[in-house]
Image (cartoon, rainbow, N blue to C red):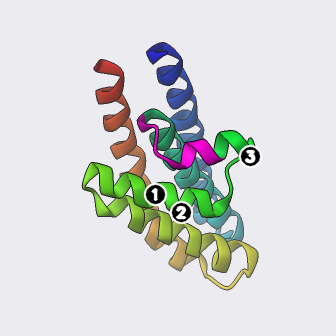
Amino acid sequence: MVEWMSSAGEARLELAEKFLGEAREYVASGDAVQASEKLYRAVEECIKALAEALKVPELKTVERRERWDTWLLGSAARSLAERLGEPRIEFTWAVAYDVHVWGFHEAKYSVDKVKMDLPHAEWLLEYARRVLRQVVDR
């Protein structure tokens, strides 16, 4: 079970790292819309990795519905923030969702606005790595 958790969580964080790298590339090339989508996807994968590793209550609904919905990701971010005593998880999710709506779907944010939010996603990726290492080492 721990091995599966480790490999699934690892795979999600590798994907998050890939998306974050793509977000940086899109920022550098001036594409705010695609940078917004990739930043959101990076944060989404971090939330899923943490939620699955720590078995937050929202997982029951995910398993029953056989998919993650946006509201479940938001709820999981809140559960994680509470359980881990780290409000930046919830904040980073809120930032990513905002960028997804206004930067990607509505295409209203400039690349400078999206660039401002990269450090939040970078923090969450590193934080998720640390937490997953602790879970696997138990």
The residue located at (59%, 65%) in the rendering is 27
Judged from the image, the secondary structure of the residue bearing numbered disc 1 is helix
The residue located at (54%, 34%) in the rendering is 14
Tell me the tag on residue 124.
Answer: none
- Residue carrying label 3: 65
Residue type at mark 2: give it.
Gly
The residue located at (54%, 72%) in the rendering is 114
Residue 66, picture quadrant: top right
Q: Where residue 121 sits: x, y (%)? A: 45, 57
Q: Which residue lies furthest to the left in this view?
A: 85
Q: Nearer the viewer, mark 1 or mark 3?
A: 3
Mark 3, residues whose alpha carbon is within 10 Å: few (<14), some, or many (≥20)?
A: few
Q: What stretch is highlighted in magenta?
A: 54-61
| Precedes in sequence: disc 3 or disc 2 | 3
Residue 87, picture quadrant: bottom left
Q: Where residue 47 sits: x, y (%)? A: 50, 49
Foreground residue among 28 and 21: 21
Q: Where residue 133 sits: x, y (%)? A: 33, 27
In the image, taking residue 107 as reference, residue 21 lies left or right, namely left
User: Can residue 121 be spotted in the picture?
Assistant: yes
- Residue carrying label 2: 74
Question: Any magenta on residue 57?
Answer: yes
- Residue carrying label 1: 77
Judged from the image, the secondary structure of the residue bearing numbered disc 2 is helix
